[in-house]
Image (cartoon, rainbow, N blue to C red):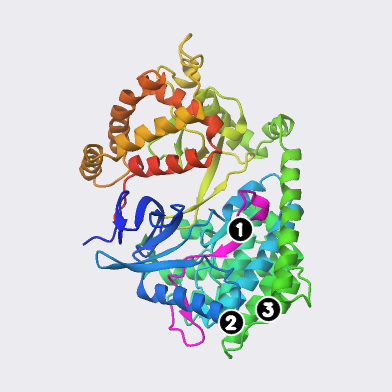
């Protein structure tokens, strides 16, 4: 039987599956679920299937933590475990958002301000990794999506703390088995792992250093190597594995030894790596080399000191000090971003062009922009071949009939796997020969009749004047109706039929059929709430929801609806 869950599945008459939150490289998925037996119907994160070895790691770490009197602050609390349809599952507390949300929130702040935030997160992560290591395990897959930020009892991002998740690759240490070089995340693995062998604590710590580097600089020089390599079920081909991992290793060593030198003008920014981070990376690399001769644990105090930590506070005292330091640094970063924003900066960016671009004959080109989350949504815009990313964004916004730049961002897919990270493209970056982009932000649904920059007179802006307002209660009621209609067996059966007919591939014919199927429900529901039963009506409805997008109930139901109608499940 296939190890996959669907919305409305119930495990052990207790955990009602709401939506799939993430997909691992090894086949296991994480689902948002409701604990129907708790008094508050709390949401939990449910991993299914979970390998027996991972479940044993989770249980052991939690038991050891409780036995030693330490707070289990380095991982989510394990609430329950069991079996369903012959496979094991584990239920843990639901955490908020992955670490890249912090990186994205600091876009526009100076490197110095961003580093003040990241070095505090780094110190917290060192303590969490030290706790895991002292309990006899190494994580083996420290990467941005395996670090979640969460605050207990408050919705403020200033109160978020980092938690480590996904122990599917964790190993005993000492005493672990040799691993393939591509086990974990090659983009963030340590230099030493490129040769295979047994993983140790310093490998986790070096991976953390590369995560901080990614937070500061975005894409790193070797990301293109892993992105273009041949992957199958989360592994490199036998032919590519030593080559790819070797290239990544050499690039990481070069960054540690000489910054951005040798990588070209694009990577000159790496020469601005903070001295504290450079020192941290050198220390952990030296520790990895020493670990090859000894099973001794790293000098965690020296690593914390390298990241600006205070000595003599003890674990709990240092954690309390860093919680306060994070609040101050994150607030300063938010203020800096707010201060740096605005149209004045945008207009200045517009004037910046690639100096060599004028040598290329200027002409119009068409580029495709596809939504990163709502993959069925895309549009084609016409721009000059000499333009920069900002011009593509403005062309998209023009098609949508909005002017606020923050509504749409163009992003780059980072790394490999089924649960990717996205990083914003630089507005100053020339598009050169690139003709396909990925967008995040608002829907890319275009009003019917609109033809883009070359629209006939009188057709541009069709539908702009259509406005329907919703109260929060009406918005929630509309979502409830969509949940009922999209969740019924008739729609789900048709959805499976469309998926099977297109072999579970996100091809243009599938996207068209999928959009038509969803619209067959939308056009029946919209009139009762005052919206036209047209595709334009869908766009107007989405605009009417904007005032409520910070409401937790709206967010919860939106995620549930997206799971019911979302992109097709992909065969592993």
Reading the image, the residue beneath label 3 is 300
Q: Where is residue 21 drawn, in percent x and y?
A: 42, 53
In the image, residue 241 sits, relative to residue 31, either above or below, namely below
Find residue 68 and name its label. 2
- C-alpha span from label 1 to label 3: 22 Å
Please report the residue visible at 47 percent of the width from the left and 88 percent of the height from the top. 175
Q: Nearer the viewer, mark 2 or mark 1?
A: 2
Q: Where is residue 358 drawn, in percent x and y?
A: 63, 33
Magenta stretch? 153-179
Q: Is residue 330 visible?
A: yes
In the image, residue 381 sits, relative to residue 411, either above or below, namely above
Q: Residues within 10 Å of mark 2 (few under 14, many from 20)?
A: few
Q: Nearer the viewer, residue 495 or 242?
A: 495
Left or right: 537, with 101 as reference point:
left
Task: Determine whether label 2 and label 3 are within 8 Å by CB.
Answer: no
Q: Residues within 10 Å of mark 3 (few under 14, many from 20)?
A: some
Q: Earlier in the sequence, mark 1 or mark 3?
A: 1
In the image, residue 363 sits, relative to residue 68, either above or below, namely above
Q: Where is residue 100 drawn, in percent x and y?
A: 58, 53
- C-alpha span from label 2 to label 1: 34 Å
- C-alpha span from label 2 to label 3: 19 Å
Reading the image, the residue beneath label 1 is 214
């Amino acid at each position: 039987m296939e190890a996959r869950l669907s919305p409305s599945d119930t495990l052990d008459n207790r955990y009602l599956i709401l939506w799939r939150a993430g997909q691992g490289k090894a086949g296991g998925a994480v689902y948002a679920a409701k604990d129907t037996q708790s008094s508050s119907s709390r949401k939990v994160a449910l991993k299914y299937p979970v390998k027996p070895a991972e479940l044993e790691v989770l249980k052991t770490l939690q038991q050891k933590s409780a036995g030693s009197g330490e707070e289990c602050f380095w991982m989510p609390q394990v609430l329950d475990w069991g079996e369903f349809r012959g496979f094991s599952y584990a239920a843990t507390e639901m955490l908020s958002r992955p670490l890249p949300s912090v990186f994205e929130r600091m876009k526009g702040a100076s490197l110095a301000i961003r580093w003040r935030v990241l070095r505090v997160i780094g110190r917290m992560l060192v303590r969490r990794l030290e706790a895991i290591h002292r309990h006899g395990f190494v994580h083996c897959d420290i990467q941005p999506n395996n670090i979640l930020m969460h605050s207990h009892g408050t919705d403020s991002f200033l109160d978020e703390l980092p938690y480590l998740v996904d122990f599917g690759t964790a190993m005993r240490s000492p005493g672990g088995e040799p691993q393939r070089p591509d086990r974990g995340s090659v983009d963030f693995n340590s230099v030493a792992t490129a040769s295979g062998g047994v993983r140790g604590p310093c490998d986790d710590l070096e991976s953390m250093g590369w995560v901080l580097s990614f937070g500061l600089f975005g894409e790193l020089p070797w990301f293109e190597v892993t992105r273009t390599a041949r992957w199958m079920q989360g592994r490199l081909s036998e032919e590519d594995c030593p080559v790819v991992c070797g290239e990544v290793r050499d690039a990481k060593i070069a960054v540690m030894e000489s910054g951005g030198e040798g990588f070209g003008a694009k990577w000159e920014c790496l020469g601005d790596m903070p001295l504290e981070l450079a020192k941290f990376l050198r220390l952990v690399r030296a520790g990895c080399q020493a670990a090859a001769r000894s099973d001794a644990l790293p000098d965690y105090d020296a690593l914390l000191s390298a990241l600006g930590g205070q000595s003599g506070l003890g674990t709990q005292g240092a954690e309390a000090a860093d919680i306060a330091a994070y609040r101050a640094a994150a607030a300063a970063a938010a203020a800096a971003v707010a201060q740096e924003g605005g149209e004045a900066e945008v207009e200045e960016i517009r004037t910046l062009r690639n100096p060599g671009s004028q040598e290329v004959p200027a002409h119009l080109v068409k580029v495709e922009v596809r939504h990163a989350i709502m993959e069925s949504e895309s549009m084609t815009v016409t721009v000059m071949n000499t333009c920069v990313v900002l011009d593509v964004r403005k062309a998209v916004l023009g098609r949508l009939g909005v002017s606020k730049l923050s509504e749409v961002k163009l992003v780059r897919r980072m790394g490999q796997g089924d649960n990717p990270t996205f990083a914003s493209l630089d507005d100053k970056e020339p598009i050169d020969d690139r003709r396909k982009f990925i967008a995040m932000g608002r829907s890319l649904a275009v009003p019917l009749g609109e033809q883009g920059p070359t629209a006939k007179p009188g057709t541009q802006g069709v539908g702009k004047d259509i406005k329907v307002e919703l109260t929060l209660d009406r918005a929630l009621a509309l979502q409830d109706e969509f949940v009922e209609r999209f969740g019924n067996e008739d729609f789900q059966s048709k959805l499976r039929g469309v998926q099977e007919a297109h072999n579970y591939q996100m091809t243009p014919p599938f996207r068209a059929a999928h959009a038509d199927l969803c619209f067959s429900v939308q056009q029946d529901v919209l009139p009762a709430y005052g919206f036209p039963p047209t595709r334009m009506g869908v766009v107007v409805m989405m605009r009417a929801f904007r005032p409520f997008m910070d409401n937790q109930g709206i967010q919860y139901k939106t995620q549930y609806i997206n799971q019911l109608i979302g992109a097709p499940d992909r065969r592993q």
